[in-house]
Image: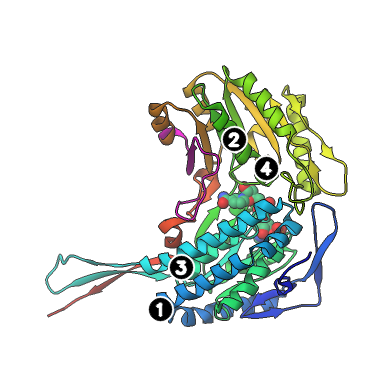
Amino acid sequence: MQLNNPELLKNASFINGQWLTSETVFEVENPANGQIVGTVSEVTPGQLEMAVNSAYAACEVWQSKTVDERAVILKSWNDLIRDNQQDLAQIMTAEQGKPIHEAIGEVAYGASYIEWYAEEGRRIKGSVLPNNQQGRRALVQQTPVGVVSAITPWNFPGAMLLRKASAALAAGCTFIVKPSELTPFSALALAELSLQAGIPPGVFNVVIGSNAQPIGEVLTLHPKVAKFSFTGSTAVGKKLLSQCASTVKKTSMELGGNAPFIIFEDADIDKALDGLMRSKFRNAGQTCVSANRIFVHQSLHDELVERLRLMVSELTIGDGQDETTQIGPLINLKAVEKVEKLVAQAVTSGAKLVLGGEKIKNSGYFYQPTILTGVKPFMDIFNQEIFAPVASIIAFEQEDQVIQLANQTNYGLCSYAYTNNANRIWRLSEKLAFGMVGINEGVLSNALAPFGGIKESGMGREGGHWGIEEYLETRYVCIGNVE
Ligand code: NAP
C-alpha cells in the first residue's frame, strides 16, 4: 500500500490514547490475492479491563466538556477523515476487498454521521412539565448512558463503526469497539485520526482480537459498560443479546436482512434495473440491505432478466485497488463455499442458472456475478442471506401475493419496490414488514434517516435524532415543597 500518511497503518489496540501491543499477533489477509496486509497484536485480558476502566473514567472528562467543545472535536475528526479519504479507502480495500470507488464512498458516508451528530449533540434537550400539584416542579433530563461497547462487522469496516461512535460521543458517552478480526486496520486508522482530532484518552478505544468470544464476553458482561451496540449476523446478535441480559444493558442490534426487491408491471424498467444493480451488486452483494429476493411481475420477467443478464455480464471483476473494478472478491473462502452451496441447492431444486454460478479460480475469493430464475420459497436461497453477487429472481402475478411472499421471512431490515401507482406506493409503505422501505430507490441510507430493522433484523436505529436517543437515558426530576 502506498499511503500518503503511513501513520494511519497501526498494528495494536488503541486504549486510553495509547497503542498497546502484546506478544501474540495475527495476520490479516487481502481477499483479492491472499497476500498478507499486515499483522496485528491480540488484545490481552488485562488490556481489555484497562479499556473498560479508562472508558469509565473518561466519562467524567468527556461529559464535563460543553456540547460546543465536543462538537468542535468531532468536527475536527470529520475533517481529518475527509482529508485522509484516499488513504482510508486504500486500507479498506486492501483488507475488505471492495472496489476503491466504493471504499472512497464509504469513508465519506461514515464521516457524514460525525458531521451530523456533531451538530445533533447540540439539540439534545429535556423538558419542564406543567405543574399538576401545588409546590411541585417536574423536569425531564436526557443524560448520556455512560460507557458504550460495540462490535462491528467486516462488510463496512469504517461506516458501521462511525455510525455508532459518532452518535455515542455526541451524546456524551465514551466508546470501546471491537472490529472484525478480518478488517481491523480501518478501525485503527480511525483511532489514529481520533487522537489527532483531540478526542481525549479513554473516550474512543479500539480493541483487536482474533478470538471474538472472550472479547465479546467482556464487552457484554462487564458491569461498567452501560450500553452494547452490535452490527452483525442475527445468530451472533441473539447470543450477545442474551449475554447483555445478565446486567440489563441497553442494547442496539443491527442484524441480518433478507430484502425483497419488487418490480411491478407499471414500474419504470430502466430505473428499476439501475436500482437493482446498485442494491444487489454493491460490495459484491455483501450488504445487509442487498436485494436478496427479486420479485418481478410476470409481464416484465423475460425482458428484465435478459436486460439484467446483459448488464451483469459487463461488470468488471477484479482486485478492488484497480479503478475499473466493479465487483471485488468475497471476504473469505467460507463465504465462497456458502454461496456455492446455496446456488447448487437452488439449481438442484429446479431454479435455472441464467448467468455465472461458479467461483473464479484465481488466488482470491472471487465468485462470478450470477443470475438465477425460478427461485421458490422452499429453497435456502430464498430464506437465507446470500451475501454474494447472486441475483435470485421469482416471478409473480398479484400484489397481495407478492406482499405476502416478501413478508415471508423472520428478517425485517430493508425492502424495495418499483411502481408508478400512487395508491400502491401507500399500500406498500404500510404493508411491507420492514424497518426500511425504498420505493423507486435502491440505496436509502444517509445520516439524517433512521437505519434499522424489525423482527429478527434487530432493534434500535442509527441515523437522525433516533440514532442519538439510543445513547441517552431519560431522567425524571421532581422538586417538591417549592414555596
Ligand atoms: P458476524 O459473524 O455476526 O460478526 C459480526 C461481528 O461479531 C464481528 O466483529 C465478529 O468478530 C463478532 N463475533 C462473531 N462471533 C462472536 C461471538 N461469539 N462473540 C462476540 N463477537 C462475535 O457477522 P459478519 O459475518 O461479520 O457480518 C455480516 C452480517 O452482518 C450479516 O448478517 C449482515 O446482514 C449483518 N450486517 C447488518 C447491518 C445492519 O445495519 N443491520 C450492517 C452490516 C452488516 P470476528 O469477525 O472477529 O469473528
> Which residue type does callout 4 highlight?
Gly
Compared to residue 339, the image places residue 99 above or below, namely below
* Residue located 42% across and 31% down the image: 425
State which mark lies toward you, 2 or 4: 2
Kindly indicate the quadrant of the structure image that contains residue 17.
bottom right
Of labels 2 and 4, earlier in sequence is: 2
Work out how far the residue at label 1 is from the one at label 3, CA to CA, in angstroms: 12 Å
State which mark lies toward you, 3 or 4: 3
Disc 3 C-beta below 8 A from ligand 1: no
Work out how far the residue at label 3 is from the one at label 4, CA to CA, in angstroms: 32 Å
Work out how far the residue at label 1 is from the one at label 2, CA to CA, in angstroms: 45 Å
Could you classify mark 1 by the number of other residues whose Cα lies within 10 Å: few (under 14), some (14-19), or many (20 or more)? Answer: few
Q: Which residues are magenta?
A: 430-451
Residue with the mark numbered 4? 285
Residue with the mark numbered 1? 66
Please tell me whether residue 443 belongs to the stretch shown in magenta.
Answer: yes
Rendering coords of residue 348 (x, y %): 77, 25
